[in-house]
Image (spheres, rainbow, N blue to C red):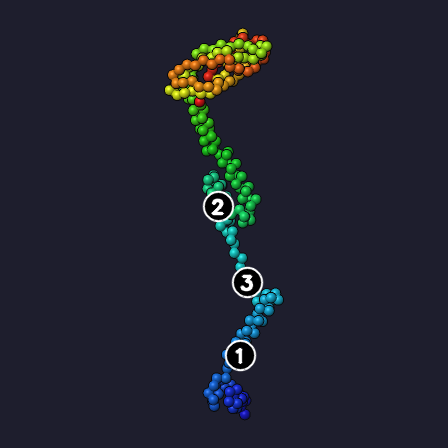
């Protein structure tokens, strides 16, 4: 005798494997409320398993290397430095987000190395020499122009303060340029009877000289005489600078 079951709709006896009742023609599967109940029950079970630390229900998340661009920039900086491309090395190092460096000490050390190698590179040394020569030429031209434009016409001096202080009792300076000269800086050189220079004393006259004119200044305190003061016998005066 075949195994039978009751239809849950019409309660007639039908074959156990029947999916549709041959009498009431209704489906014999799970009802919608039953399916919803099972789904809710399954979700509750999954949630409970996750909260209890069951690794079977935990998703596996692969770590994402958010610092990958930083690693590439560091590698590029090393390659640039190894070939002497200091500008490129600095560019790549400056592109790295310092807050996310895994190689912070290495990166900072590399930056110090870039600066040191740049400072000692033949190209940098050459540029520094060229710059120094250029500045020296400019200063020489300025001095030549100054000497040609402002000249000491005459001066008189004396020892004061018990023979220890030099005083320019009068000094006449000519300004041959087309611009007003102000804050005249000069230097006074003191020599012994043999002509040996014993010392130099700078001075500044905070006044002006009009273009193409002469002007005399009086009682300029140049400062202490160089030792031995008793052997200072002569002096010369030269204008060094004028704004």
Is 166 situated left or right of 136 in this image?
Answer: right
Dot 3 lies on which element?
A: loop
Residue highlighted by disc 2: 95
Nearer the observer: mark 1 or 2; the answer is: 1
Circle 2 packing at 10 Å, graded few (<14), some (14-19), many (20+), is few
Q: Is residue 215 above or below residue 66?
A: above
Q: CA distance from mark 3 to mark 1?
A: 32 Å
Residue at numbered disc 3 = 60
Q: Is residue 114 above or below residue 220?
A: below
Q: Residue at x 54, y 48 (%)?
A: 99
Question: Disc 3 or disc 2, which is closer to the eye?
Answer: 2
Residue at (50, 49) in percent of width and height = 70
Disc 1 and disc 2: Cα gap in Å?
60 Å
Q: Residue at x 45, y 29 (%)?
A: 131
- The answer to which of 180 and 139 lies nearer the viewer is 180
Decide: few, some or many residues near mark 3? Use Cα within 10 Å; few <14, some 14-19, many ≥20.
Answer: few
Instruction: Work out which quarter of the rendered image holds the C terminus and state it.
Output: top left
């Amino acid at each position: 005798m075949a195994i039978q079951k009751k239809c849950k709709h019409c309660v007639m006896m039908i074959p156990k494997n029947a999916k549709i009742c041959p009498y009431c023609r209704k489906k014999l599967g799970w009802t919608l409320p039953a399916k919803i109940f099972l789904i809710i029950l399954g979700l509750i079970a999954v949630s409970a398993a996750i909260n209890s630390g069951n690794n079977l229900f935990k998703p596996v998340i692969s770590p994402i290397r958010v610092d990958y661009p930083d690693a590439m920039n560091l590698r590029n900086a090393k390659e640039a430095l190894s070939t002497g491309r200091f500008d490129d090395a600095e560019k790549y190092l400056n592109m790295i987000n310092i807050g996310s460096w895994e190689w912070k000490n290495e990166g900072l050390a590399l930056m110090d190395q870039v600066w040191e190698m740049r400072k000692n590179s033949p190209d940098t040394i050459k540029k520094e020499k060229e710059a120094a020569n250029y500045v020296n030429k400019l200063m020489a031209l300025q001095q030549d122009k100054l000497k040609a434009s402002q000249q000491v016409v005459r001066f008189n001096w004396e020892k004061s303060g018990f023979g220890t202080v030099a005083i320019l009792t009068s000094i006449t300076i000519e300004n041959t340029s087309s611009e007003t000269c102000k804050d005249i800086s000069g230097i006074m050189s003191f020599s012994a009877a043999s002509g040996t220079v014993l010392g130099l004393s700078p001075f500044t006259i905070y006044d002006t000289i009009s273009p193409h004119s002469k002007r005399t200044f009086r009682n300029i305190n140049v400062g202490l005489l160089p030792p031995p003061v008793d052997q200072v016998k002569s002096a010369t005066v030269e204008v060094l600078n004028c704004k």
